[in-house]
Image (spheres, grey):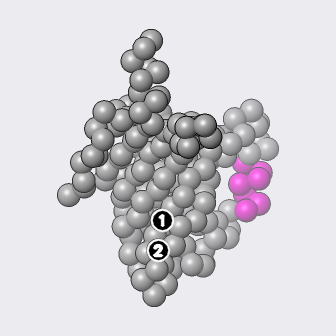
């Protein structure tokens, strides 16, 4: 169903790909937008219980796109070292393919926003975090991406570096 990587030597393992997702700060969610045009939007996210979660408003282009077509991809760039003298970039990135849905289960929604908050502010107190979530909870929508395929890749130069060690 999903293509195999052409340059398989550069492919990251599933474990390494998940590690990239776990430490990433943001990514680009690509959806099928209005009039058949791709719609890619940068988002904060959390990898939690084997799924990706994003927060959103309850209305807008992203929500309309998810309702019209749940299939999506999400890309996270982990490393991006510009090497001008070689006219290249030493990169490491992961693309996830899956189905995005609006979380309707209230306990899942609450747990997902808590996981997201802990990712971005791990030293916050539980009391402060809960107060912040409670303030913004009514207009909050949580999206879940059920992962169907992960494809991680790194620049050949990074592959060679790791082989030299």
Name the quarter where the N terminus is drawn. Answer: bottom left
Q: Nearer the viewer, residue 159 or 20?
A: 159
Query: Residue beneath label 2, please?
Result: 38
Badge 1 crowding class, 10 Å Cα cut-off, few under 14, some 14 to 19, many 20 or more, is some
Going from the N terminus, do you reach mark 1 or mark 2 first? Answer: 1
Query: In screen coordinates, is 82 left or right of 40?
Result: right
The reply to whether residue 130 is in sight is yes
Q: Position of residue 8 (x, y in %)?
A: 28, 38
Residue at image coords 46%, 70%: 31
Q: Position of residue 93 (x, y in %)?
A: 48, 43
Query: Residue reaching furthest left?
Result: 1
Residue at image coords 31%, 50%: 149
Element assignment for label 2:
strand
Q: Which mark is residue 146?
A: none
Q: Which mark is residue 30?
A: 1
Question: Would you place residue 7 above or below residue 37 in this image?
Answer: above
The reply to whether residue 105 is in sight is no
Q: What residue range appears in magenta?
A: 130-136
Query: Residue reaching furthest bottom?
Result: 35
Query: In screen coordinates, is 147 left or right of 2?
Result: right
Question: Would you place residue 60 above or below residue 141 in this image?
Answer: below
In magenta stretch: residue 163: no
Query: Residue reaching furthest front?
Result: 85
**Contact, CB < 8 Å: mark 1 with mark 2?**
yes
Name the quarter where the C terminus is drawn. Answer: top left
Residue at image coords 52%, 48%: 76
Q: Position of residue 153 (x, y in %)?
A: 40, 40
In three-dimensional space, the C-alpha distance between marks 1 and 2, rounded to whole angstroms, equals 7 Å
């Amino acid at each position: 169903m999903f293509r195999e990587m052409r340059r398989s030597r550069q492919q990251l393992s599933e474990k390494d790909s998940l590690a990239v997702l776990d430490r990433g700060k943001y990514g680009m969610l690509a959806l099928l937008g209005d009039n058949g045009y791709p719609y890619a939007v940068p988002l904060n996210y959390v990898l939690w219980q084997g799924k990706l979660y994003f927060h959103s408003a309850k209305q807008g282009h992203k929500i309309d796109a998810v309702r019209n077509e749940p299939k999506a991809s999400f890309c996270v760039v982990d490393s991006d070292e510009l090497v001008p003298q070689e006219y290249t970039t030493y990169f490491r990135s992961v693309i996830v393919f899956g189905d995005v849905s609006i979380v309707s289960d209230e306990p899942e929604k609450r747990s997902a926003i808590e996981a997201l908050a802990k990712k971005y502010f791990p030293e916050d107190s539980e009391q402060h975090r809960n107060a912040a979530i409670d303030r913004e909870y009514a207009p909050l929508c949580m999206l879940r991406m059920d992962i169907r395929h992960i494809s991680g890749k790194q620049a050949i130069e990074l592959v060679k570096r790791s082989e030299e060690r």
